Image (cartoon, rainbow, N blue to C red):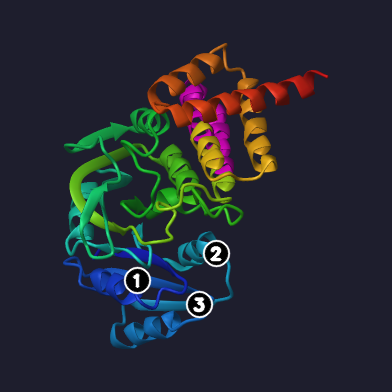
Amino acid sequence: MIKISIIVPVYNVEKHVSKCIESILSQSYTAIELILVDDGSTDQSGCICEVFAVNDPRVKVIHQKRQGVSGARNIGLDIAQGDYIGFVDSDDYIDPNMYKIMLQTIQKYDADIVSCKTNIVSESGEFLSNLTSKCGSLSKLNHIEALSAFCSSVGQVISNSTCDKLFKASIIKTIRFDPKISMSEDCLFVCEALFNAQNFILIPDQLYYYVNREGSAMHSKFSYKNLEAIEALKKCVILYEKNEPNLAMMMKNTLLTSLLNILISAFEAKTSQNIKNKICNELNMLSNLKYNGRFNDRIKHFTYYKLKSIKLMLIFKKIRKIITRVQDRKIK
């Protein structure tokens, strides 16, 4: 019987991890291997994982010193024995039929990756929104179509997340999460996997539940980890330039839009001038990356569609001043 390995990094989630694990072990498709990686938890999370392992032979528990979510997932990948691999975050949960539906789909269409829709819910279970907004029906994408969809509208058609996907193990056996990146590490991993995939399937079924908790990344307007997200996108640009140069401009556009969003968030959060200057330096470097004269047009497009309030217009004027100052400094 075909086996699915499901990797769950666990760190200080004693209040939530049981619900996550139970949702996985109660899957209607039972040929699963659940790998729980206790990433140096200081609460009872590791003990809770062990209780599940005692009661269900499908559960494997790894305890390690704190390495971060990327390091924990990599350990899981190293020992995974499944024909297909999925990821779940330890404070989320999944539909009872998630892996049955995804496995049937990936086999029916002989695909390398299948992705479902994610419901974003509150801690009480109230529906808030969908993670991806442009998947209304089943879609089969070939290699180029998937790469184009990913870089032209990151997060809208094909999400950055690994958790709403099932991967054929053979296409990710040489890919690992970057341990130096703790935000948008999923984005880089998915990008690399897409370059190895020949066929990608999007299904409209809402099977993954992302719990939007207080203090989560979705609640915070700006975090210093946003700068690591920039690094992830820059590495995605390099991958496109090397392997699909005709699509590289679209990924650069995505990086540009992300930089502008992060810079606006930095202004709203009143971060230090050094942080703002660092982001503006990234913008300035991007403007010199063979942008074919479209850099300023891209900023104008962003301004028109994104900056609709007087407050944001004032912030953007400050941004333009900083960019100009950085450029003048380089000329001198």
| Picture coordinates of residue 286, whole percent (x, y) | 61, 26
Q: Which residue is mark 2?
A: 68
Which secondary structure dominates the residues rendered in magenta? Answer: helix
134 or 316: nearer the eye? 316
Which of the two discs, 2 and 1, sits closer to the camera?
A: 2
User: At label 1, which amino acid type do we have?
Assistant: Leu
Q: Give the residue drawn at x 64%, y 24%.
A: 321
User: At label 3, which amino acid type do we have?
Assistant: Ser
Q: Is residue 71 above or below residue 247?
A: below
Name the disc covering residue 34, or none. Answer: 1
Q: Give the residue drawn at x 48%, y 25%.
A: 313
Which of the two discs, 1 and 3, sits closer to the camera?
A: 3
Left or right? Give the position of 329 relative to 60.
right
Location of residue 142 by image quarter: top left
Specify the farthest residue to the right: 332
| Picture coordinates of residue 322, whole percent (x, y) | 66, 27
Q: Is residue 68 above or below residue 120?
A: below
Q: Is residue 241 magenta?
A: yes
Q: Is residue 236 above or below residue 114?
A: above
Location of residue 145 by image quarter: top left
Q: Are marks 2 and 3 in contact (CB under 8 Å)?
A: no
Q: Is residue 149 magenta?
A: no
Q: Which residue is mark 3?
A: 41
Give the Cα distance between marks 2 and 1: 19 Å
Q: Secondary structure beneath disc 3? A: loop
Specify the farthest residue to the front: 310
